[in-house]
Image (cartoon, rainbow, N blue to C red):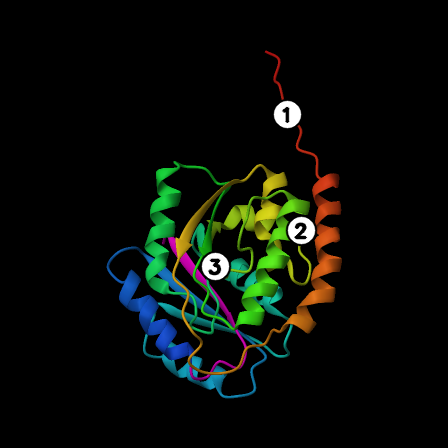
Amino acid sequence: MELSVVIPVRNEVTNVEPLFMEIYATLEGMVDYEVIFVDDGSDDGTAVTLDQLSEQFNRLRVLHHRHSCGQSTAILTGVRAAQAPLIATLDGDGQNDPADIPKLLDTLHQQGDNDLQMVCGQRLKRQDTLIRRVSSRIANNVRSKILEDKTLDTGCGLKLFHRKLFLRLPYFDHMHRFLPALALPQGAQLSWVEVNHRPRTGGQSKYGVNNRLWAGIIDLFGVKWLQNRTKRPELTEKF
């Protein structure tokens, strides 16, 4: 198996089945893959819908959190359970386009065999409200200058990376927002690919300006501290 697609979801009952069918249509026959939905304590029927869907498709695996633990923990649960060396992540709200996954795979394969690779999607044409687009642009510019990771859209859920790389990263709540900055001190090679972004057609967003702002500021300086404290020795061997 080459690819595990990990999708954290919470209360996305109207989105999970269409999203899985899009992934199935995109990847079936192209690559050996699995899809792992991590249900993060949903209470709207998402869990039942996923379990029923998994009975029809052996490509689909469903993991359940008894209580909501947050998106970063859900991603970690999925990556730990993954059977493939490559991980693709995308959000469960349907705004990321599964048709972009092959572009990320092509970019990664063009760079050669390197376990420290990460390909990040960039949403250049955001299909969000004006206040979310403006606040996200400001936040990304500030974050990029402080963390120096050259990432214009750290909030894009569509990413592709080696499982080994992810499992080397320090874990904390909200870490998924800082994956490129966390990967760089590990010696990771980063690439960026423009990806499609679609309007949300069902369910409700779990995030707003207020519930991201203060936690994001604290996390930002915490990640900077981690970057400064991470040392990568250069080894020489004497024969």
Q: Which mark is residue 234?
A: 1
* Residue type, mark 1 in image: Glu
For image coordinates 59% across by 11% down, the residue present is 239
Name the secondary structure under disc 3.
loop
* Residue type, mark 3 in image: Ala
Residue 92 among those drawn in magenta: no
> In this view, which residue lies farthest toward the left?
29
> In this view, which residue lies farthest toward the bottom?
44
Residue behind mark 2? 170
- Which range of residues does the magenta coloring cover? 1-14
Residue behind mark 3? 82
Q: Residue 88 lies in what quarter of the image?
A: bottom left
Q: Residue 206 lies in what quarter of the image?
A: bottom right
Q: Where's the N terminus, which quadrant?
A: bottom left
For image coordinates 69% across by 59% down, the residue present is 172
Please state the horizontal and vertical placement of residue 14, each as a whole percent of the image: 43, 84
* Residue type, mark 2 in image: Pro
Q: Are marks 1 and 3 in contact (CB under 8 Å)?
A: no
